[in-house]
Image (cartoon, grey):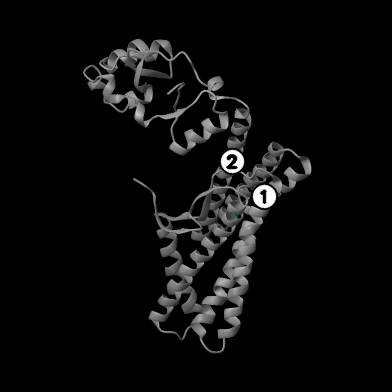
């Protein structure tokens, strides 16, 4: 099942909502309508609390979207494709096709988001100034959104990769040292440290103040820690693949088995003894698919002796294809795009 759906397209970028977003949207709307506004403004009526709560919540997420669009705007202007922007439980995320090629682009892309949040805070402050003596609900909403946008800018500027502040840190170290890998190491280590710090403060707040806020902060910290770690691994992988071709990365000794072979024979006589990770399925040199030990596990073991390989294999139409001369980064991107662990390297037609 897809975990998100697209609802708009801005600057050619599909804007999506992950289903997890509805949880946070409901929580924020309910907190504002049920507690925050009734506490701050005791003399409104119940429907007003909920309408203002709903509008504030929607505008908060519109602000998050504007923040991501600001990052994306710079990326697109600098020739980097933005695949999508998605709102999810921890905020918004823009999926950018590739990393910035130079430090200055990374710096500009990173600061654009927090700057847009500060600018939005200014707009909401202005609305608050104009409405505070005439329309209290509008003023209440505006001042809340002003503060939340300032908080958003400040939080995002914390210097741990992959947060905006961490990207700023990386671009500066990259620019000063000239080493992308060193800069990534410094910024992702800072991200891991920051993640740990957030987890610890979350636990402390959870025990001493209020469990929900503490748990939330700890979860954000855990998310940041994992993202920092994954970003560094990704950078190392990219670095080690640079300059290699698909031909140099592939295994050439893939054995071929016929489609009618039973899974039992396949596992006992081919997969287990040879220790091959993958086998080609087909005959007369024509590849119909591939089969791995993982594929066979999808069929119950008691049916192995009557199930032909053809039923368990991944058909060739579903496999990604690269050419021998493609470079290592293309291979990696193709695998990550399709979320597949195997690619066929083909030559000729
Ligand atoms: Zn940002």
- Looking at the image, which residue is at 66% across and 57% down? 111
Residue with the mark numbered 1: 105
Vertically, is 239 above or below 308? below
- Looking at the image, which residue is at 69% across and 39% down? 180
Q: Which residue is at the front of the view, 219 or 8? A: 8
Vertically, is 78 above or below 59? above
Q: Crowding at label 2, few (<14), some or many (≥20) Cα neighbours within 10 Å?
A: some
Distance of label 1 from label 2 (alpha carbons): 18 Å
Whether residue 158 can be seen here: no
In the displayed structure image, the side of residue 216 where residue 47 appears, left or right:
left
For the N terminus, the quadrant is top left
Q: Which residue is at the front of the view, 80 or 307? A: 80
Q: Which label number is shown at residue 231?
A: 2
Q: Secondary structure at mark 1?
A: helix
Q: Is mark 1 within 8 Å of ligand 1?
A: no
Q: Crowding at label 1, few (<14), some or many (≥20) Cα neighbours within 10 Å?
A: some
Q: Is mark 2 within 8 Å of ligand 1?
A: no
Q: From the top left corner, tell me how far across and down residue 133 is, in percent.
A: 56, 89
Q: Secondary structure at mark 2?
A: helix
Q: From the top left corner, tell me how far across and down residue 188 is, in percent.
A: 64, 43
Q: Residue furthest right?
A: 176
Q: From the top left corner, tell me how far across and down residue 248 is, in percent.
A: 56, 20
Whether residue 244 can be seen here: yes
Hey, which quadrant is residue 239 in on the image? top right
Q: Which residue is at the front of the view, 219 or 300? A: 300
Which mark sits nearer the N-terminus, 1 or 2?
1
For the C terminus, the quadrant is top left
Q: Residue furthest bottom?
A: 134
Q: Which label number is shown at residue 317?
A: none
């Amino acid at each position: 099942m897809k975990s998100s759906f697209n609802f708009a397209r801005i600057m050619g970028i599909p804007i999506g909502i992950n289903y997890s977003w509805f949880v946070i949207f409901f929580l924020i709307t309910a907190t504002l309508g049920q507690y925050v506004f009734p506490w701050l403004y005791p003399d409104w009526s119940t429907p007003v609390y909920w309408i203002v709560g709903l509008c504030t919540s929607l505008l908060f997420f519109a602000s998050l979207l504007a923040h991501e669009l600001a990052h994306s705007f710079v990326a697109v202007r600098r020739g980097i494709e933005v695949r999508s922007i998605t709102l999810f439980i921890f905020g918004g995320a823009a999926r950018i096709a590739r990393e910035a090629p130079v430090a200055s682009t990374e710096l500009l892309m990173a600061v654009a988001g927090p700057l847009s949040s500060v600018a939005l805070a200014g707009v909401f402050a202005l609305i608050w100034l104009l409405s505070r003596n005439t329309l209290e609900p509008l003023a209440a909403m505006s001042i809340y959104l002003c503060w939340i946008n300032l908080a958003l800018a400040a939080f995002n500027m914390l210097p741990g990769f992959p947060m905006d502040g961490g990207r700023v840190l990386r671009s500066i170290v990259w620019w000063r040292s000239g080493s992308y890998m060193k800069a990534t190491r410094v910024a992702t280590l800072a991200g891991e440290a920051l993640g740990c710090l957030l987890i610890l403060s979350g636990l402390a707040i959870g025990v001493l103040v209020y469990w929900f806020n503490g748990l939330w902060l700890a979860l954000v910290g855990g998310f940041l820690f994992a993202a920092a770690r994954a970003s560094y691994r990704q950078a190392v992988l990219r670095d080690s693949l640079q300059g290699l071709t698909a031909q140099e990365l592939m295994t050439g000794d893939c054995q071929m088995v016929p489609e009618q072979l039973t899974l039992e024979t396949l596992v006992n006589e081919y997969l287990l003894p040879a220790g091959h990770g993958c086998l080609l399925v087909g005959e007369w040199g024509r590849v119909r698919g591939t089969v791995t030990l993982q594929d066979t596990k999808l069929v119950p073991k008691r049916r192995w002796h009557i199930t032909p390989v053809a039923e368990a294999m991944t058909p060739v139409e579903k496999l990604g294809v690269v050419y021998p001369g493609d470079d290592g980064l293309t291979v990696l991107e193709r695998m990550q795009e399709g979320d597949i662990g195997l690619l066929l390297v083909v030559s000729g037609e």
